[in-house]
Image: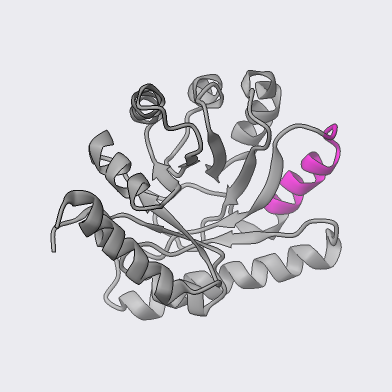
């Protein structure tokens, strides 16, 4: 079986598991553009990258190959000085990692660099106490973000939802992952009581914990190793 067939089979198995419950974002970071093309040829369209320069290079490579209907998801930590570079990338559709008020404000300040039709973003929420994690902490910081968002003119980037990650350093992987996901669900419900005009999707779950994430209500899962890794 060729590479397209191998990746296509893995993606098909994952999509059957997910059913209509969540969008599968194939995390292609660190993998060559040829793998993305192979997965694209197998019918997949949603791909996630975590570095602006790597995404830019892959986007240009795929454009040269005549691929113009891919859907890019940026999933990595984003520095404010890279926002304008990210927004220029063709077929960017979602940013999953808006992790501070400073970055949120910069996104709106640089919105004119985006030339696509729609750009949804997720506020990254820190649901564990790990120092290496980025994200909004506490409901008050999220309320501040939403108050800022509702004051912005229509027609720019829009809030699509909330994102979190399970705990990295843990002796109880499943328990801590479920706790992180349940916490984000509770945060979503609390926010929607006061901000009912939003329809907040949830981005949570990766290769090791996507099944738990979906069972807790995830709408987007970010899976890399289970697709592009070695069997």
Q: Main secondary structure of the magenta part?
A: helix
In the image, is 228 to the left or to the right of 118? left
Most foreground residue, 34 or 1 = 1
Residue appearing at x 78%, y 65% in the figure: 192
Relative vertical location of residue 35 with respect to residue 213 in this rendering, above or below: above
Q: Quadrant of the C terminus?
A: bottom left
Residue appearing at x 34%, y 46% in the figure: 41
Residue appearing at x 55%, y 71% in the figure: 20
Q: Is residue 218 visible?
A: yes
Relative vertical location of residue 38 with respect to residue 167 in this rendering, above or below: above
Most foreground residue, 162 or 38 = 38
In which quadrant of the rendered view does residue 31 lie? top left
Q: Position of residue 26 (x, y in %)?
A: 38, 52
Q: In which quarter of the image is the N terminus?
A: bottom left
Query: Is residue 167 found inside the magenta-colored segment of the image?
Result: no
Query: Is residue 144 found inside the magenta-colored segment of the image?
Result: yes
Q: Where is residue 222 in the image (x, y as percent from the top left)?
A: 41, 56
Relative vertical location of residue 96 with respect to residue 67 in this rendering, above or below: below
In the image, is 186 to the left or to the right of 150? left
Residue appearing at x 37%, y 21% in the figure: 64
Specify start and end residues of the magenta stretch as a single range.
141-154
């Amino acid at each position: 079986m060729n590479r397209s067939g191998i990746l296509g089979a893995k993606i098909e198995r994952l999509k059957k598991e997910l059913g209509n419950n969540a969008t599968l974002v194939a995390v292609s970071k660190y993998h060559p553009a040829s793998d993305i093309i192979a997965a694209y040829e197998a019918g997949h369209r949603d791909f996630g990258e975590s570095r602006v320069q790597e995404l830019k290079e892959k986007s240009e490579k795929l454009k040269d190959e005549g691929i113009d209907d891919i859907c890019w998801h940026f999933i990595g930590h984003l520095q404010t000085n890279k926002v304008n570079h990210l927004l220029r990338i063709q077929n960017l559709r979602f940013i999953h990692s808006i992790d501070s008020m400073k970055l949120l404000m910069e996104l709106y300040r640089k919105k004119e660099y985006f030339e696509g039709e729609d750009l949804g973003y997720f506020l990254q929420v820190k649901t564990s106490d790990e120092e290496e994690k980025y994200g909004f902490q506490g409901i008050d910081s999220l309320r501040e973000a939403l108050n800022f968002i509702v004051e912005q003119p229509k027609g720019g980037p829009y809030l699509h939802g909330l994102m979190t990650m399970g705990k990295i350093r843990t002796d109880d992987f499943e328990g801590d992952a479920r706790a992180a996901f349940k916490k984000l669900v509770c945060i979503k419900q609390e926010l929607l009581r006061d901000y009912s005009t939003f329809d907040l999707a949830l981005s949570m779950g990766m290769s090791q914990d996507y099944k738990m994430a979906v069972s807790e209500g995830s709408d987007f899962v970010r899976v890399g190793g289970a697709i592009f890794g070695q069997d």
